[in-house]
Amino acid sequence: MKRDALPLLDSLQPGMPAVPVAVAWGDGIGPEIMDATLRILAAAGARIAPQRVDIGEQVYLAGHSAGIAPEAWDVLRSTRVLLKAPVTTPSGGGFKSLNVTLRKTLGLYANVRPCTAYAPWVATKHPGMDVVIVRENEEDLYAGIEHRQTAEVYQCLKLVSRPGCERVVRHAFEYARAHGRRKVTCMVKDNIMKLTDGLFYRVFEEIGAEYPEIAKDRMIVDIGAARLATRPERFDVIVTPNLYGDILSDIAAEVAGSVGLAGSANIGTGAAMFEAIHGSAPDIAGQDAANPSGLLQAAVMMLVHIGQPQVAATIRNAWLRTLEDGLHTADMAGPATRLTLGTAAFAQAVIERLGQAPTQLPTSGFGAEGSARHGSGQVASTVSGAGPARAAKAPPAKQLMGVDVFVDAPGIAPDALAAALAPAADGSPMSLSMITNRGVKVWPNGLPETFCTDHWRCRFLAGESPANVGHADIIGLLSRLVAAGIDPIKTEYLCSFDGEPGFSLGQGQ
């Protein structure tokens, strides 16, 4: 299929209107696997009206730092569905992640990544693996808010919101309910990040209580990742914050057999994006060696999402039959491979098997609502994640209690820094209570063995009357610190909410 033609794909159901879909061919192997995927969709009778959008490396190099031109947004906002091949982000500073930009700008809050084993036709040590990763898509460290604060220290802010947690957690439970899944596991690191990851898990507990038929489980993400790699059969649906989800989904895909087989759905309330989870692989671009399966699985998820489940099932069953017949691309090659095919030939093999079903792998079938009728769960949830309405809560009572002042002070001992800081609090309702360096308390009662950089967090807290602390007190404190030759680089206000501290406590606090 020529990329400049963008034909209307014919339908098996002539009365069914064509659905406008934005299509991006991407970079590297992207054009090859997109051509192969669209050939299969056309042969299967998918009724879509592709609208080309140019994104990726050439758009970056043309001066658009996010990898997408302004006019492409009009197409995306019009179609609200994007089938996207992988893109390459140029190396060097100043270039933003296009995937992150698309997900956040379009409000695609849930990334659904099914990872299924296809043994024995695709080699894996875990033939029974069938796991779905539901990854929060907009927040966490992927907010991309970073600063260089001193000569030695850089920071990245981890942002987690209650609405963001609620949307993705509810989506995971609604997905599990719609697809007959038995358990949802929450993976977090709330033993260390008690506020951010702690919030994610609290929301998981709250929303999980509304789904009594679904088992709930929690795991610390480090041991959870290890067990996903060695005992994936213990998991069903996993819901997790953004960064962990990125890592876990690649682990799961690789354990299942190949990252090249997995597609993903990025779901929002008003738009959706479907893509393979692998990268653009420029090292094999143009060699007719790439596996189109990941993008094809994403396209199957897209067809279910736009209301063409029968075509989706036809394609997936033909793809499964192709695997069973031992026709594989090079990355899948193993003992069960009868013939190793290039990209185009593999697509043709799938086309020749349209209308056939696998004889040993579970046959795929998708209901009208997008629910899976087979064991693999390879389907994008059409559930919006809204779920039952939650009663509105009154905002908590917020009380300013003090401030953390971060200062740039190279080559100074903690006791000397404290002596320089303390006078600035004279006449203020706050006093210096703690100094930390990279999160470790070094004053008072620090240890000389602690390694320190030039970046210090200096906590000023009110005594028994925090109600006396106001914004003017903090501004005055900062003015006195600057007058004393201190270099403040950042402040974080310390507040309580309904009497509970809204900030982490240091050692000994």
Image (spheres, rainbow, N blue to C red):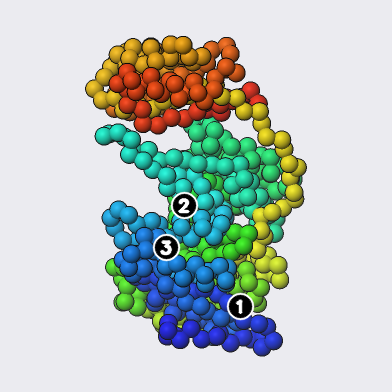
Q: Position of residue 410 (x, y in %)?
A: 26, 25
Residue position for label 3: 278
Say which element carries label 2.
Answer: helix
Between residues 491 and 194, which one lies in front from this camera angle? 491
Badge 1, how many Cα within 10 Å: few under 14, some, many 20+? some
Residue position for label 2: 246
Q: Position of residue 472 (x, y in %)?
A: 50, 23
x 49%, y 18%: residue: 461
x 44%, y 76%: residue: 34
Between residues 485 and 339, which one lies in front from this camera angle? 485
What amino acid type should be assigned to the residue bearing mark 3? Answer: His
The reply to whether residue 178 is in sight is yes
Q: Quadrant of residue 291?
A: bottom left
What amino acid type should be assigned to the residue bearing mark 2? Answer: Asp
Q: Position of residue 126 (x, y in %)?
A: 50, 56
Q: Which mark is residue 19?
A: 1
Say which element carries label 3.
Answer: loop
300 w.r.t. 171: above or below: below
Ranked by sequence position, the earlier of labels 2 and 3 is: 2
What amino acid type should be assigned to the residue bearing mark 1? Answer: Val
Q: Are marks 2 and 1 in contact (CB under 8 Å)?
A: no
Between residues 229 and 477, which one lies in front from this camera angle? 477
Ranked by sequence position, the earlier of labels 1 and 3 is: 1
The reply to whether residue 126 is in sight is no
Q: Are marks 1 and 3 in contact (CB under 8 Å)?
A: no
Which quadrant of the rendered structure holds the N terminus? bottom left
186 w.r.t. 487: above or below: below
